[in-house]
Image: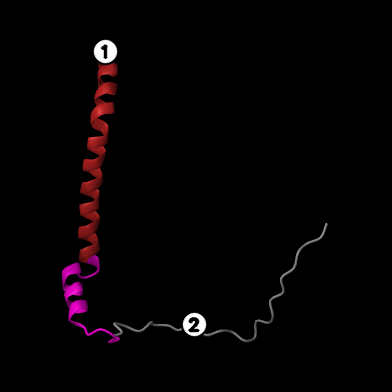
Amino acid sequence: MLVYFGFKILLKYFGPMLLKYAMRKMGRKFEQQFSQQFGGGQQRTQQQNSAKEGKVSIDKEPKNRRKSNKEVGEYIDYEEID
């Protein structure tokens, strides 16, 4: 019983600190994965800073463009009456 209550008290006081540590560590891991996946944040910000204000640049175009189907018909909104 003494071990249980001792563990409970320790968790009450040191739990928030452990949680903050774990959250910081996970945040750093996510930042690293994000920077690896999307080409690094520093290079991208330097490219954006070097671009002139008002200049438009397109990195890539979408592969497929959606076209509306004119044969679908008209949509009618209705309510069911009991």
> In the picture provided, is 44 more to the left or to the right than 62?
left
Residue 33: mark in rendering: none
Which image quarter: residue 5? top left
Give the farthest residue toward the front: 53
- Give the residue at mark 2: 66
**Contact flag, marks 1 and 2 (Cβ < 8 Å):** no
Which image quarter: residue 34? bottom left
Quarter of the image where the N terminus is located: top left
Which image quarter: residue 41? bottom left
- Give the residue at mark 1: 2
Q: Is residue 56 above or below residue 49?
A: below
Three-letter residue code for mark 1: Leu
Q: Position of residue 24 (x, y in %)?
A: 22, 47
Three-letter residue code for mark 2: Arg
Instruction: Identify the mark nearer the N-term, 1 or 2.
Output: 1
Identify the residue at horizontal 49%, vertical 82% (top origin): 66
Kind of element beneath mark 2:
loop
Q: Position of residue 82 (x, y in %)?
A: 83, 57
Q: Coloring scheme of the render?
A: secondary structure
The magenta segment is 37-56
Q: Is residue 52 above or below residue 12?
A: below
Identify the residue at horizontal 78%, vertical 62% (top origin): 80
Identify the residue at horizontal 20%, vertical 59% (top origin): 32
Q: Which one is in front in this view, the residue at disc 1 or the one at disc 2?
A: 1
